[in-house]
Image (spheres, helix red, strand yellow):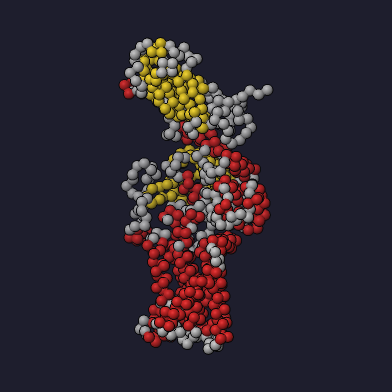
Amino acid sequence: MHNEEHTWTIEAKASLFDLKLNEVWAYRDLLWLLVRRDFVSFYKQTILGPLWFFIQPLFTTIIFTFIFGNLAGISTDGLPKPLFYMAGITAWNYFADCLTKTSTVFRDNAAIFGKVYFPRLIMPLSIVVSNLVRFGVQMILFLIMFIYYYLADASFQPSWAITLVPIVVILMALLGLGTGMIISAMTTKYRDLAFLVGFGVQLLMYATTVIYPLSTAIEKYPKYAWIIKYNPMTPIIETFRYGFLGEGSFTWGSLCYATGVTLALLVFGIVIFNKVERNFVDTV
Amino acid sequence: MSNIAIKVENLSKAYQLGQIGTGTISRDLERWYARTRGKEDPFLRIGESNNQNTKSESNIVWSLKDINFEIEQGDAVGIIGRNGAGKSTLLKILSKVTAPTTGKISGKGRIASLLEVGTGFHPELSGRENIFLNGAILGMRKKEIQRKLEEIVDFAGIERYLDTPVKRYSSGMYVRLAFAVAAHLESEILIVDEVLAVGDAEFQKKCLGKMGEVSKGEGRTVLFVSHNMQSIINLCNNSILLQNGSIKALGNTHEIVLQYQTNSQSIESEKTWPDTAAPGNDIVKLTAIKTFDKNYISKKSYDVIDEIGIMLEYVVLKPNFQLWTGLNIHDDMGNNLFDTHNITSKLYNSIHSTGRYQTIAWIPKNFLNEGSISISVAIFNHQLHEIHLHIKDIIKINIVDHLTTNTLTARGLSQGKFPGLIRPLIQWE
C-alpha cells in the first residue's frame, strides 16, 4: 500500500504551462509496453514480418533512382544515386511517420482515452519510439548499401558530421512529434485538417532536399530556394547526408535554426496537446 | 480534510449538442474574443437543466450542475439515477477522462477507475502481455504487476491460456481477465462503472465480493455505478441519487434506493379508470387495480418480507354471469412465475348480479424473489370458455431485499443475488 499522502485536485482550468512531464515519467513502463505492443502486433499480423520495414524504402529508392535520377536527370551531387535517395528517404520516412501517426493520435485512441486516464503524452511518445525501432531497421538497410558502395567505388568519404547523426535523429523525431501534436490537437475539432496531413506531408517532401541536393535548388531557382532553406527539415537531411556521404550543404547556422524551430514547435505542441486533451473526449 | 477521500465542490459540466465539426471556427473565434475581453462565454447559458425530453433553446446542456459532496475514506458509495442523470459524466470527471466546466474536486490517494474492463487489450497479444499492458494503462508499474501476476491469473482462472492470444478467449474469459487486472490495482480509491453487467452470475458475485473486500477489508474508498439496485445495496453503505444532473438525495443506501425506486417512472403500482373508459366488455369492466402491504400502504417497491395485496375492482354491467378472476405474474424477463384464480374466494364461480366488486389476492411474504414483477389481470370463465377481459402487464412492482436482519428470509447469510425465479422460505428439519 502507498502510505505517503498523495493529494490531488481536478479543476476546470489548468495552467497552460503545466506540461505534466513528471506524470509521464511515472508512466514510463507504459511507454515501453506500448512500443512492444505496436511491434509485436505488427509482426504477428503479417507474413513477411519485419521484412516489410525493408520493402518500402527499397522500392521507393528504386523508383526514385529511375524517375528522378535517370529519367529527369536531377543531380545527386556526384553521389551514387541509390545511396543518395536512400539516405534522404530513410531520414524523411522517420520524420513523416512520426508526424502522420502523431497527427491522428486522438482519433486512433479515442476509445482508450475515453475510458481511462493516463498522461496522454505517452501515446505520441510511444509512436515516436515505435517508429524509431522501424527507423533502426531501415538504417541497417541503408548501412548495408552504404558499405557496399563504399567498397565498390569509394567516390565519397563520410565526414566528421557523422557524429551529429544521433542529434539529427532526435531532431527529426521531435520535429515530427511537435508538428504532429499541433495537428492532432486541431483535428479533434476541425476534422478536415486530417485530410490535409497526408497530402501536405507529400508536398512537404518536395520542399525538402530528399530527391535533390540543396545546392542544385539554389543554383536553379535562386529566387525560391529560400522556401527550401527555411524548411527546418532541409538542414536536418542535409546534415544527415553530409555526415554519411560527405556531400551536402551543412552549416552550423542552419542546424541551429532547425533546432530552434523544432524546440519551439515541440513546446507549442505539448502545450496545445495538453490543453485539448482535457476535453477532447466531449468533441471527438 | 483528515478523513475525506474525495471532496467535490460546485462541480458542473456542460456539453455541446449537435454537430461540433461545422462552422465552429467562427464560433470559437467569437468565444475567444469574448473571453479575452473578460466577458462570459456567449455560448454557455447558465441555469438550464439537462432534461433530455425537452428541446432547449441553446445547444449547450448541463450534464452536471453544481454538484457538492464529500466521501469519507473507506466508504463505499453507490451512484444511482436514471439514464442521462449524469452518473457517467461524474465518473468520467473523477477519473480525469474529461475535465469539468466549472468547479473543483480534491482528494487523497491514488485513483483507479474502471469505466470499462479490458481497456487497451490487444487481441493479438497473449493473456500475459495484456495483463502487463492493461495494468500499465491503469497506472501500475511493471514491478507491481509482476508481483501480482500470480494472484491476477488465479482470480481470472486462466492459467492454461496465459500465453494464448486473447482473441482466442471466450468472452467470459476475456472479461474475467480484464476485471482481475483492475481488481488488483493498488489504489486507495476505486471507481467502477457498470462493468459487471457482462460475465456470468457467479463471476459477478466474485467481483462484488472482491470489491466488498476492497472497501471493507482494506479501507479503500469505492464509487460504484449500477442499475442493479441489489448490487448497490450489497456493496454500498451510502448512495447518491442523481437526477437531471443534480443531486436529488444522498445518504443511507437503503433510503436512497427506496426513494429512487418509488420515483422510477416505469414502475406503476396502481391504475384506476372511470367506468366509461374502463377496459372490458359490455358484461364486466375492470375499474381499478391497486397493490399494498398488510397495513394497506401502497408502494412501488415491496420488501421480500412484505405480504403483497393485489386488489381488483370491477363493475358488472349484465347480471347472471359466473365470473372468475385471475392474475398472471411474470418477472422482468417474461417468465411466468405463477397464475392464480380466485378459487378461495366466495366470489369464485358465483353468479354475479350487477354492481361493483372488490377482491384481493394476497401474495405471501418470503415468496417472490428480488426484481420487478408485472401483473396481468383476467376476468373469465374457463369452464364456459368465456374471456371477458385479459389485460397483460397492467402494472409493475418492485421486489427488493433490504436485508433486514431481524426477520428470517430465504437468503440467510448469503450475499449477492439469490438465485431462482421465486424465493420461498422452505421449512428444513
Residue at the image point whose x is 47% and y is 17% from the top: B342
Q: Which image quarter: residue A183?
A: bottom left
- Residue B146, x across and y down, in percent: 66, 56
Residue at the image point whose x is 44% and y is 32% from the top: B267
Above/below status of B320 relative to B261: above
Residue at the image point whose x is 40% and y is 50% from the top: B15
- Residue B274, x across and y down, in percent: 34, 22
Q: Which image quarter: residue A38?
A: bottom right
B205 vs B108, nearest the viewer: B205
Q: Quadrant of the C terminus of chain B?
A: top right
Above/below status of B399 relative to B344: below
Residue at the image point whose x is 42% and y is 59% from the top: A188
- Residue A191, x across and y down, in percent: 39, 60
A40 vs A267, nearest the viewer: A40
Residue B164 shows in the view: yes
Above/below status of A208 relative to B66: below
Please state if B102 lies on the left or on the right of B169 as rendered: left
Residue A21 shows in the view: no
- Residue A170, x across and y down, in percent: 53, 73
